[in-house]
Amino acid sequence: MSYIDIKFLNLLSTRLQKFKRKSENLFNFRCPHCGDSKKSSSKARGFVYRKKNDMFFKCHNCGVGQTLGNLIKFLDPTMYKEYVFERFKDGKVESEKPEFDFTPSKILKTKTAHERTLESLKRFDQLVTTHPAKKFLFDRLIPKIHWDKFFFCPNFFEWTNSIVPNKFPSLKGDHPRVVIPFYDRAGNFFAFQGRAFGKEQPKYITIKFDETKQKIYGLDRIDLNKPVMITEGPIDSLFLDNALALAGADAVVNIQHEQCTMIFDNEPRNEQIVNRMKLAVDKKFNLVVWPESLKYKDINDMVIAGKTPAQIESIIYRSTYCGLEAHQHINNWKKV
């Protein structure tokens, strides 16, 4: 919880009926959405509480749940702009140091045959600067710290068959692709995505060789003690702090939903995306509904257009909704 959160909550307190600080990280007042009980003026069932390092609002009468920022936006849009400015003025969110020490245990283990097959490919950070495949990274402005997460595969069909026998019965039309490996929480390699360099179709081929797992990228890097953002594609997730990518999966790992924000591509004419957004809201996830003025398809497009991480986070923060409010914004945003 940051000083800025407390500062703005205190500014709001004068317009919140029955406002009380119940404990260090718990605040109680009458819900400004439903007005709380109409029969009893003493009932106050709206709460602002701390969840890890962020503040959330929940009403136990009408059921509305949202971030503190969205509560401020609902009550005072002008104050909300000031709140966003305060939080992002230095290019990062003001926040206390977490009170936990999440250090995944590092256990030496024998590499599997699949991992050895992956290592037969060259990582992009091992390719010479003039290698034509490097253009893939340069064009997308992918930071160097992430180059080791991509592998160059000169013959994708043939290489895939060495992991999943006869996945491609015919090698006709074999071509190079970018290989993006997926690891589980324990660091085990269980799937990969082959992304086309050119106009080869399909653009993305995601293959699992462990059918017990979902196609979710970034599990090995995620900190479950912090809020999690969930994008559609692996590349977008690399530009956000603590993010996963669905990569075609319809669900996510067992994370507390109030900590998760789903971020789909900005395609209001895509009926499949619209339906998945509605499903995410019904499953109680927070959801980003992009503003109509935003013309970029996804987060990587924003980066390429010159948006800074702080600017992108600010747009996400201002566009995050849940529950009925999220459904209303989806209906205004969609064009199908």
Image (cartoon, grey):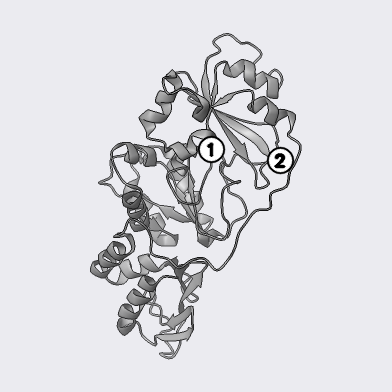
Mark 1 Cα within 10 Å, few/some/many (few <14, many 20+)?
many
Using the rendered view, name the quadrant where residue 197 is placed.
Answer: top left
Task: Reply above or below: 219 against 270.
Answer: below
Task: Reply above or below: 270 against 20.
Answer: above
Residue 21 left/right relative to 312: right
Residue in the foreground of this view, choosing between 24 and 329:
24
What residue is rendered at 30% in x and 44% in y? 307
Q: Secondary structure at mark 1?
A: loop
Residue 167 appears in the picture as rendered: no
**Residue behind mark 2:** 212
| Pointer 2 or 1: first along the chain | 2
Task: Reply above or below: 260 against 233.
Answer: below
Q: Secondary structure at mark 2?
A: loop
Using the rendered view, name the quadrant where residue 320 is placed.
Answer: bottom left
Residue in the foreground of this view, choosing between 102 and 76:
102
**Residue behind mark 1:** 247
Q: Quadrant of the C terminus?
A: top left
Count all numbered tags in the image, as a single digit. 2
Q: Amino acid at mark 2?
A: Thr
Q: Position of residue 76 (x, y in %)?
A: 27, 71
